[in-house]
Image: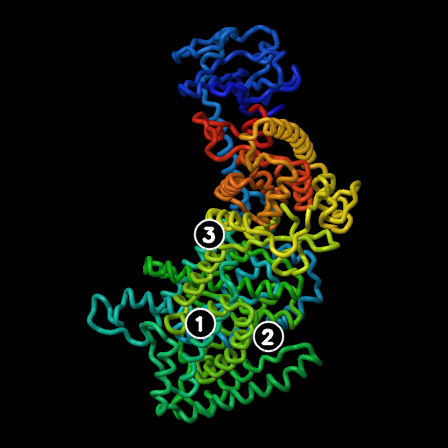
Amino acid sequence: MNRGFMVPGRSKRTRKYSVGATYDHPDAKPPSGHIKTIRTTMLVDEENNDYSRQSSPVSSSSALSKAAFVIGADEEDLAFAHGGEPPPPQEPSPSPQPDTLPGSPPPAPWALPVYINAGDLFHLTDASQVTTNILYKRIYGLNKTPKDCLISLFPQFFRLKNYKAQWMLQDFFAGLIVAMIHFTQVFASSMTASMKPHRGLPLLIFPGFVYAFMTTSPHNSLGGMPITAAALSISNINVEQEYYPGGYFRNESRMLTSDETLYIHMRISTGISFVSGMILIIFGILKLGFLSAVLSPTVTEPFTIACFAQSICSQLPSMFGVVTPIRFGYAKTIQDTIFFFTHIQSVSGFETLLSISYAVLLLGFREYLQPVIFHRFKTVVPLEFILYAAGIGLSYAFDFPGVLGFRTVGIYSYGLPKPNIPAIDYGSPLIFGGFVNAIVSYSVTLRSAQTLARKSRDVISPNQELLALGVAHLFGSFFNCGTVAAPVGRGNVNLSMGSRSQLSTIFACIFMGLLIGYAGPAIAHLPVCIISTNIVLFLVMSVTGFAELPRLWRSNKFDACVWVITFAGCIALNVQLGLMLGIGITLLGLIMRSQKPKVRVLGRLKHSGGFVPLKYYEKASELLGIRIIQIQSPLHYANSQYLIQHISAIAVEPFVGSPASLGLDGGSTSSLNTLGLSRNESLLGVLSKKDTIVRGLRSHWSGSVSNLAASNSEVARRSERHLQQRHLDANNDSRAVSPSIISQEFILMADRERGTASRIVLDLGTVGYIDAVGIRALEQLASDLKLKAIELLLAQCKGTLLKQLKELAIHKIIPERNIFPSVVDAVEEALRRIRINTQPAEGLIGEYEDERFWDMPVVPVEGLPVINYDID
């Protein structure tokens, strides 16, 4: 079946349209469910804005050029359309009788009730189809079968199909080591988040268990970490200040106690985790995983270092037995540092001695013994866990809290936490904190997954990671868990221990559950100074970003400035505001740079078939009469005006250096000879032999633009004959001679005298995206150049760009003969036109009524032209 479209008539003021679809064969059946078959003909009087239509039955002899709009037909009606008996008559519609064309048969009674706006119907159908396509592409799981959706939702289940039994022992030991490392870090994470140390124990069990089944990374280890803890601390404090200003109950005159404040922070963290989970799930359903690109490394690296610095400064006093209060307001890191040095006299000697002993043992082992052990046995010794156990034993044996005044984890409710409703009653203050924590958690987790995937050659799905992380947060919020993430460090340990799947995380969760369930009374004796020393050493050894700053400054000063401003914002304000500041500056820089993209003038290298920027190749030169300009950015509304002005200025600049001369010798020398070619050898032939890219372009375009090439040749021949006739007329009347209608010798002489180009080849090969405003900018540029007797040719118009040019009907200003698949083709054609003295195509913006904007609706049908401009 042929799809219908509007066909404008030849009349300038009154046009006839046929709307709909036709059947190629008289015996063809329309789709089932159709009711009637009619032909709707519209008559448009553009002067009086008069629209009329006529409906009549479709005969079997209807030409395929006359489109029949099918709104439905059954077998009986189709037989009547081919000469059979008509269907039973129906009651006439109360609608007014339509106007009819002279000489046309009267409409059948059964066709009279059918009065529709064909354009509206097609627009509704197209809008519905477009909406459906968008939903299928952008909504998670709609374009998959239930089985495929289940596989993508729980990828680890189906990876176990190829799992080998001998891998289970490796996963078991890897999970055991990861759980021990996680055990030593969650205490400090809870303290950094302004909560009691034991609040971090469930962070691996509940979120990690869910994440293990849904993630696409086989080695990520989800749990608590200092980065998310620092961001969560700011959110906890901000919400507390909103509901408990100054540390007071709103309805009571008394202040919050320390334990009450820490408990409130725990409740707030569950609400933030719930909001973060919902945000991540929504992003995952909408497939917004690409938004991770918003966080540039020049923003995430200083943010990470600032979070580490906040954790170090908050834990440094505890290493020496100094109790620090919870800080509010800005510059928390600076406040903690000042507080420590102003209270240096409160340092505990015994706790300092224990912290130093722990640090010496840990650093010595990590630097000297761990590499040897790993080289020989391929295992990581969890020395931190061993030292924790030793500290618990010493504290219990010698009663450190009672005798020496040590601070310990203390007594708490042992066992696994019971399910509770998250504290979402704090309302809107949770939204901003949840959003920021969701971004931080996702960026850290995805970066870890991608880093580990490069080592193990796994495939990571950002959208699936959004869902997995969102469900983990949502599930964990019901078990008093705050925000979590998967750091690269634990993942590297998991990978180095030979882990093959997320079964290692399952084993780690089981081990942590046993610790929480049965080792609670022992954990209560763990000294806080050991917890603080462990996390400070870990973070200090992890800070390596400052070493990259000098190199970054030398390579890109703007990125270096973003790095410094982000870090300064995180320290001077807080980590959340500093992160937002860094993201804002990065996006602002992208907008500023996209508004003024780079435009390069290309030239031809001697004895080469390539065109290169003149700025970087001194031996490259331009062809006299032709200027090749390359746009090195997308073309959109933000930079279109700048590009028009910039390219227009470059187009009239004189040639620099010694461009390749066209040098006519008595008017008989071909312009191709300037390139060192013989008369029988074309430029494209030589360039194709030298340039594999050109050969690839030619083979790619040989079939797809054969019609366009034929059209270019035919139009060029007609234009040539037309211009020759105009040139003869100009010779008979000297007053008709204008700068745009001159002889070949005059053009070359003018080019030599003014040293400017008469043809501009615009290379669009690096324009990855162009919007409707960009298309109109090309039209404006072509119109402006025509006023200066300069012709614009578009090169490397391929794929989507070529489709956009056709759909937006740019050919009124830039004809199809001026659009080429490669720069080589455009240059060869420009040289040929200079040789035969063709002129720029006529047609400027504003010279005629733009027929693309008729008052009546135009029906676009995919694959068919909306308007046939050859009629005019």
Disc 2 to disc 1, C-alpha distance: 33 Å
Residue identifier under label 1:
567
Tag shown at residue 177: 2
- Residue 324 placement (x, y as % from top left): 35, 81
Residue identifier under label 3:
282
Given the image, on which type of amino acid does mark 1 rest? Phe
Q: Residue at x 46, y 56 (%)?
A: 591
Instruction: Determine whether the residue tagged by mark 3 lies in a helix, strand or loop.
Output: helix
Disc 3 to disc 1, C-alpha distance: 30 Å
Please rate how many residues cluster around mark 1, counting C-alpha atoms within 10 Å: few if below 14, some from 14 to 19, many from 20: many
Considering only vertical position in the picture, is 383 above or below 772?
A: below
Assess whether mark 2 and mark 3 are in contact (beta carbons under 8 angstroms): no
Which one is earlier in the sequence, the residue at label 3 or at label 2?
A: 2
Tag shown at residue 91: none
Q: In which quadrant of the rendered image does the C terminus lie? A: top right
- Residue 495 placement (x, y as % from top left): 63, 69
